[in-house]
Image (tube, rainbow, N blue to C red):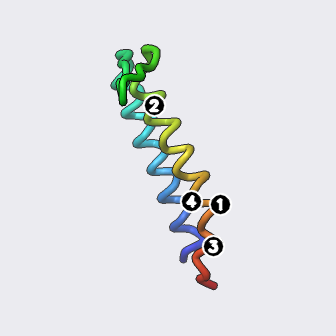
Amino acid sequence: MAKVLIPLLTAVWIGVVALIAIQNAAPITFQFLGFQTIQIPIGLVLAFSVAIGMAGTALFLPLGGRD
């Protein structure tokens, strides 16, 4: 069951991110501790955040000790 559920949830999550990215194409600027980014679409920020989160989870999941 898990062999089907995990890819299905991943596909749904990627679809949701794509839908939000398409609907929010307006450029934004982040400002944190005096630093400011260039103007980039919020969908791109969201896509990068999800990709970094998925990669981090994939890297650190084996360290959890669960077999």
Question: Residue 18's spot in the image, x, y percent?
Answer: 45, 35
Q: Which residue is mark 4?
A: 57
Q: Residues within 10 Å of mark 2 (few under 14, many from 20)?
A: some
Question: Residue 20's spot in the image, x, y percent?
Answer: 37, 33
| Disc with the residue nearer the chain's start (4 vs 2) | 2
Q: Which residue is mark 2?
A: 45
Residue drawn 61% across and 81% down? Answer: 65
Residue drawn 52% across and 36% down? Answer: 48
In whole angstroms, how far apart are the C-alphas of marks 4 and 1?
5 Å
Mark 4 in CB contact with mark 1 (< 8 angstroms): yes
Quadrant for the C terminus, please.
bottom right
Residue drawn 36% across and 29% down? Answer: 33
Please state which amino acid type lies under the numbered disc 3. Answer: Leu
Q: What is the secondary structure assignment of the residue under circle 2? A: helix
Between circles 4 and 3, the one closer to the viewer is: 3
Q: Nearer the viewer, residue 67 or 18?
A: 67
Mark 1 in CB contact with mark 2 (< 8 angstroms): no
In whole angstroms, how far apart are the C-alphas of marks 4 and 2?
18 Å
Please state which amino acid type lies under the numbered disc 4. Answer: Thr
Question: Residue 63's spot in the image, x, y percent?
Answer: 63, 73
In whole angstroms, how far apart are the C-alphas of marks 4 and 3?
10 Å
Q: Which residue is mark 3?
A: 63
Return the residue found at the far bottom: 67
Q: Which mark is residue 15?
A: none
Mark 1 in CB contact with mark 3 (< 8 angstroms): no
The answer to whether residue 24 is above or below residue 9 is above
18 left or right of 58?
Answer: left
> Which quadrant holds residue 28?
top left
Q: Which mark is residue 59?
A: 1
Q: What is the secondary structure assignment of the residue under circle 3? A: helix
Return the residue found at the far front: 34
| Disc with the residue nearer the chain's start (3 vs 2) | 2
